[in-house]
Amino acid sequence: MKGIYSALMCSFDENGQVNEKGLREIVRHNIDVSGVDGLYVNGSTGENFLISAEQKKQIFEIVKDEAGDSVKLIGQIGALNIDEAIDLAKFATNLNYDAISAVTPFYYKFDFEEIKDYYNTILANVDNDLIIYSIPALTGVNMNLEQFGELFENEKVIGVKFTAPDFFLLERLRHAFPDKLIYSGFDEMLLPASVFNIDGAIGSTFNVNGQRAKQIFELAQKGQIEEAREIQKETNDMIAAILNNGLYQTIKEMLKVKGVHAGICRKPMKSLGKEGIAQAEQIAEKYMN
Ligand code: NGF
């Protein structure tokens, strides 16, 4: 389960429906061109919180059908409706997803006991391993070392997708839980996270930059920090340009330059105008092979 995972984009048409052909092309691009080790399906980058449960299932099915067993698959099933989360967990598990993942429940200010109960309830109902998806900047849920430890007491909780710039906590987690999987979630901080001996990373920009991400991760593991720093610098030039233009929309337009029918983002995300599309095309020309 170690390595570089794309937080998979999904292709949607103008009516907000899943474009199956486009989604299959995105999967193929990630496997054949970006060369990632795995796909994180129905995460933030997949616009998971903007789509119906039926669409989530459709995406789980298409991705598994296209990827087969060629790369590892993690299915993000977290939903505020715990029945939906359990249903999606069973669905992804029946499709042979290698693991499930669930974002910390958000919006209502759940206390830690409620969050722990959420994960343990899901896992009592499904025969699969789970990776916690921690992204405090978007959920408002901050957990400390002891709280992660309590969640890890459930043996089926095998790791965490750690999307936070808190390197002190990251180092403490690594030290305290050497047997749990720790995936870094901020692509622009992949190198410093790798230096702390993470097991892998999950990111949106790997859809268009998977090869560089793999190089950074592997060089850091070998202690070749100077070379890794060069590639992280080039990567961050690209990420800064993407963030400046609109994150998910720009990645989709970059994929289109490579012939991938990546579609548009679901409302209420807006589409790029002519200038934004031209900017995305320039970023693709400059940074994609
Ligand atoms: O898009 C976000 C929002 N974060 C992603 C990633 O952590 C999300 C990150 O790659 C993810 O894994 C998922 O789709 O579930 C950033 O887009 C990237 O580092 C640029 O800032 O924070």
Image (cartoon, rainbow, N blue to C red):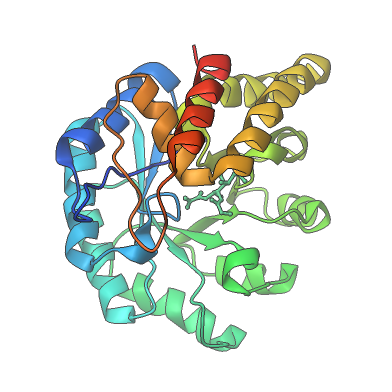
User: In the image as oriented, which residue stretches furthest toward the top?
Assistant: 289
Who is closer to the viewer here, 203 or 177?
A: 203
Who is closer to the viewer here, 209 or 255?
A: 255
User: Up-down: is 21 above or below 222?
Assistant: below
User: In the image as oriented, which residue stretches furthest toward the front?
Assistant: 274
User: Up-down: is 93 above or below 183?
Assistant: below
Q: Is residue 46 left or right of residue 211?
A: left
Q: Report the residue at 78% width, 56% height from top.
A: 166
Tell me residue 215's x, y (percent).
62, 19
Q: Is residue 247 left or right of residue 68?
A: right
Q: Report the residue at 66% width, 23% height from top.
A: 216
Q: Report the residue at 24% width, 55% height from top.
A: 92
Number of numbered tags placed on the structure image: 0
Q: Report the residue at 77% width, 34% height from top.
A: 195
Q: Is residue 5 visible?
A: no
Who is closer to the viewer here, 28 or 119?
A: 28
Q: Is residue 177 visible?
A: yes
Tell me residue 34's x, y (percent).
44, 22
Tell me residue 37's x, y (percent).
44, 29
Q: Quadrant of residue 177?
A: bottom right
Q: Quadrant of residue 94?
A: bottom left
Tell me residue 178's x, y (percent).
67, 48
Q: Quadrant of residue 223?
A: top right
